[in-house]
Image (cartoon, rainbow, N blue to C red):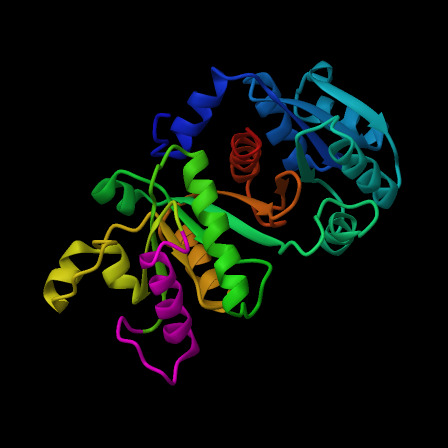
Amino acid sequence: MTQIRSLDQLVTDLKGQPSRRVAVAAGHDENTIQAAARAAAEDIADVTLVGDRGRIESLCRQFDLDAGVFTVVDEEDEARAGAEAVRLVRDGEADVLMKGLIGTDKYMRLILDKEKGLLPPKAVLSHVTVLDVPAYRQVHDKLLFVGDVAIIPEPDLPTKLKIVQYVTDAAHAFGIDEPKVALLAATEKVNPKMTACVDAAIITQMNRRGQLQGAVIDGPLALDVATSPEACEIKGLASPVEGAADCLVFPNIETGNVFYKGMTILGGAKLAAAVVGTTAPCVLTSRADSEESKFLSIAMGCRLAR
């Protein structure tokens, strides 16, 4: 499998593959419907909009979209629209779920529903973001897979193991055979008083003993030595990540959220994101996310569903 090194390359690669089926919960949202129309027009996805047909048709006229590229399931109520979109995925009639004009709390409750949702028993729900950072790609010619920046506030050691697995699996889906995973902390020294350092050291040792496979894992690592070979050289740090991480695992949601927003707002990064740990990828974008981010998140969901 060819390694996907940019989000533009992801889109190009998907155009040559069979389309995946995307079900949009409450699909009468203007950014979402534009992103979904683009995904359908570019043969990335077959899209079903579950939502208010009248509002969907009005938005298509407003933005000069071809309503014929969608399958529309008419449902005005956002909760019922969300439940029907989840059902389509659960019953195998769609491969990817996407949030439209439905509240995040309602969307997540539907996913987490023990009887009718998409989370397997004892599974851990998490969030993986793919960042296409111009400066990082210029130096390393690759993407960054990061977690968790949106769902898990303070992951404990078992939860961090799941996050490591999720970012590793996402990197594999993008053609990286053995991704370099950096477990981030404020320092690359093991400080027994810092939970982030202790957890990272344990996970690193598990990887070295073969308990965690499919990736090269090292930590604790400060952000500079995780992403810069020069920083490793200056600090005299020998790390198998070599200052060129494919994946970053954050110690808590604050560090992860600040990092990804800093990269997008100040660093000019493009992003795609999905909820994972579920039986199918679930696209959960912010209200502030652009149409492009939503389109790229559809593309990521389709890639993970393969």
The residue drawn where x is 76% and y is 36% is: 90
- Note whether residue 148 is visible: no
The residue drawn where x is 61% and y is 20% is: 40
Q: Nearer the viewer, residue 15 or 166?
A: 166
Instruction: Describe residue 101's horizontal placement relative to residue 125 as left or right.
Output: right
Residue 27 position within the rendered picture, expressed as x and y whole percent measured from the top left: 74, 34
Q: Nearer the viewer, residue 282 or 207?
A: 207
- Residue 203 falls in which quadrant of the image? bottom left
Residue 285 position within the rendered picture, expressed as x and y whole percent measured from the top left: 60, 46
Q: Is residue 191 magenta?
A: yes
Q: Is residue 141 above or below residue 188?
A: above
Say which quadrant the C terminus sits in.
Answer: top right
Q: Is residue 1 above or below residue 216?
A: above
Instruction: Describe residue 1's horizontal placement relative to residue 37 as left or right.
Output: left
Which range is magenta? 187-212
The residue drawn where x is 66% and y is 41% is: 279
